[in-house]
Amino acid sequence: MLFLAACFCTQFKCTSGVSPWTWSHGQKPCVLWICYLFLYHPSKRDHLEAAGHMCILKDAFDFESPSEVSDLIAAENLEAALALHLYRGGRLLQGHQIPFGIIFGGTDLNEDANHREKNEVMGRVLEEARFAVAFTESMKEMAQTQWPHAKDKIYVQSQGIATIPNAAFNWNSFLQRSEINQNADNLHVFLLICGLRQVKDPLYLVDAFSEWHQEEPNVYMVIVGPEAMDLEVPVLARNIPGNAALVKHGITGLLFADPQEFVQLAKRLIRDPELEREIVAQGQAHVQRHHSWQAERETYQHLVGKLQGPLEG
């Protein structure tokens, strides 16, 4: 039996060089896509390229200063930019005289906004940005409270999900490589979705899960990638704002406040097949209703249009 043990994010990094196009000839722009630990998969880049835009994808950590971004813009003749994370990515785009938009990250609102200097930098970035995207209404409300001058340029677009299972993946081979006892009776594998960064607290469940494993050797925890709801896998998520915005406790998943509650809920889920079936069904329906990949594509293609031409009054 397979479960998702927590709902966080993974890291993606990709760099590609392309030839710039220009708007002046009725063509699409070459867009700089600056990322800070790109979430889930490069779907935002796919959305832009599907509309004919050419993209260069960069990690914010590739740059030590805004001047390096300026050099890249000049070398590639870039005409617009889109940054993931207001502070980490957006601050690199200030003062370069190219239009840009930003996408809020959870760290922007839950961590960086609480630091005065970072908060001021993010406010200045929003003054220059033509649009800003929040994944949830609660994120939008938090951003509007912090930077009321930007309230008219903040849009809400939930993250779209499109899962494509890998036909070449072999579950038994995976278990063998992971040194998981395939002969264990009623094997239960919990997948921990977590970037290996301090802010993600990847070891949060380790001690409690280790104790549980000592009691019941047929339970395992594995770190892996996301999109479990869409793949009919029940979700247990740590009860923090970002997760609570996606998971409704007892309906689309289970939320835990501490490692001990995680173990309690996990045991309940194992022993209650009806609860598992209900959570799986509700979770998949939620994804289909609120996390449409096509709707996300249409939103970003529309917003990038705001980077074309003069700034709207």
Image (cartoon, rainbow, N blue to C red):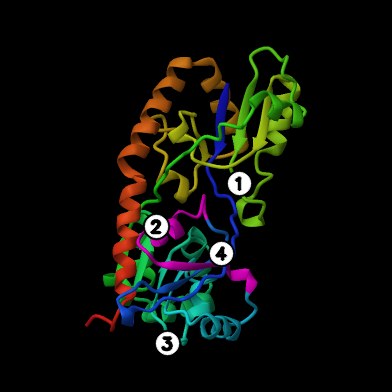
**Residue topped by disc 3:** 97
Asked whether residue 116 appears in the rendered view, the answer is no
Q: Which residues are magenta?
A: 39-62
**Mark 4 surroundings within 10 Å by alpha-carbon count, few (fewer than 14), some (14 through 19), many (20 or more):** many
Label 1 and label 3: CA atoms lie apart by 36 Å
Q: Earlier in the sequence, mark 3 or mark 2?
A: 2
Q: Nearer the viewer, mark 3 or mark 4?
A: 3
**Residue topped by disc 1:** 194
Is 3 left or right of 187, judged from the image as shown? left
Kind of element beneath mark 2: helix
> Mark 4 is on which residue type?
Tyr
Verify whether residue 128 appears in magenta.
no
Residue 235: % across, % down:
49, 33
Q: Are marks 4 and 1 in contact (CB under 8 Å)?
A: no
Q: Earlier in the sequence, mark 3 or mark 4?
A: 4
In percent of the image, x 37 and y 73: which residue is there? 147
Residue 230: % across, % down:
43, 35
Which of the pair 113/299 is nearer the observer?
299
Asked whether residue 281 appears in the rendered view, the answer is yes
Q: Nearer the viewer, mark 2 or mark 4?
A: 2
**Residue topped by disc 4:** 36
Label 3 and label 4: CA atoms lie apart by 22 Å
Q: Residue furthest left?
A: 313
Q: Earlier in the sequence, mark 2 or mark 4?
A: 4
